[in-house]
Image: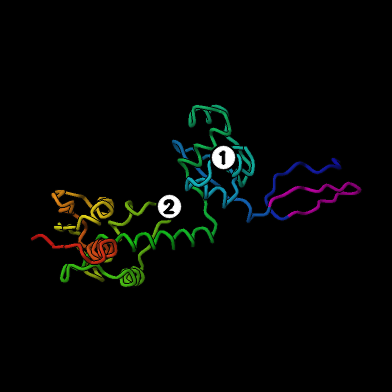
Amino acid sequence: MNRYCNPTVIISVPFTVCRDKYQIIIQTIEMADVTVARFSFEGEKFEILVKPDPALDYKLGKKKDISAILVSEDIYTDSGKGTKPSTEKLLKAFKTEDQTEIAQIIMQKGDLNLTTDQRRKMIEDKKKQIVAYIAKTYVDPKTHLPHPPLRVEQAMKDGRVSVDPQKSVDEQVKDIVEKLRSIIALKSENLQLEIIVPAQYASQSYAVLKSVGSLKKEEWQNNGSLKAILEIPAAARPNVIDKLGSITKGSASVEVMQ
């Protein structure tokens, strides 16, 4: 009988295996310290084992060093079973057999399996971004004023609107708005403001105007004052007025063009 333990790859808490007088300590990894990044190509799956938080930072562009996120450099077809792809399959899918390059491609183009805490936090962050976008871009068609963020957030809750943490705001906001329209009235519209800024505040105000909307027309007067036509989402009007009021101490003129 073989008195030695067969080598096994296990992801679990550390433990000791004893057989007769031989004792083998198997080095293992806590499950909390490992997650999977997965990429599919023409029906073939490729996986790598990564550290959850560093891998998420890498996926979000906050971390650049691929080696800092890898648990190992191995490429798997099924990391749970420990099966690996052939060189031919790697070359077909990635045009290289360099494991570091392949890991980079999997992280860039594939899906990262989020931990429960990561997913919860990302959903909350993405939800806040979507609420802020809707509040700034859409208005109540009756009043032509934006809905308060809390009202938008409550409507999302009432409508049981789900948020995908790995999709951008632009990729999902259109569908979300359609679902919300059965709960609150939403309309996307632009308006043009005629703005006159006194000379002493013109330079600073000009930079703000360019950042909040599209300048359709600008005229610098002989006395140094600025007259401009600014196009913005209707919901952004209160924010623009507040910003100009703060800079010009209330001396700027803002009129909605009909």
Residue 142 image position (x, y, % from top left): 15, 71
Query: Could you give the CA–CA distance between mark 2 and mark 1, rounded to whole angstroms?
Result: 20 Å
Give the residue pinned by disc 2: 166
Local crowd size for mark 2, using a 10 Å CA cut-off: few (<14), some (14–19), many (≥20): some
Q: In this view, does 7 lie to the left or right of 81?
A: right
User: Residue drawn 45% across and 40% down?
Assistant: 109
In the foreground, 206 or 183: 206
* Quarter of image, res 231: bottom left
Q: Quadrant of the N terminus?
A: top right
Q: In this view, does 15 lie to the left or right of 111?
A: right
Q: Quadrant of the C terminus?
A: bottom left
The three-letter amino acid code for the residue at tag 1 is Ile
Reply yes or no: does residue 6 show up in magenta.
no
The magenta segment is 14-29
The three-letter amino acid code for the residue at tag 2 is Gln
Give the residue pinned by disc 1: 66
Q: Is residue 126 left or right of residue 99?
A: left
Task: Identify the main secondary structure in magenta.
Answer: strand
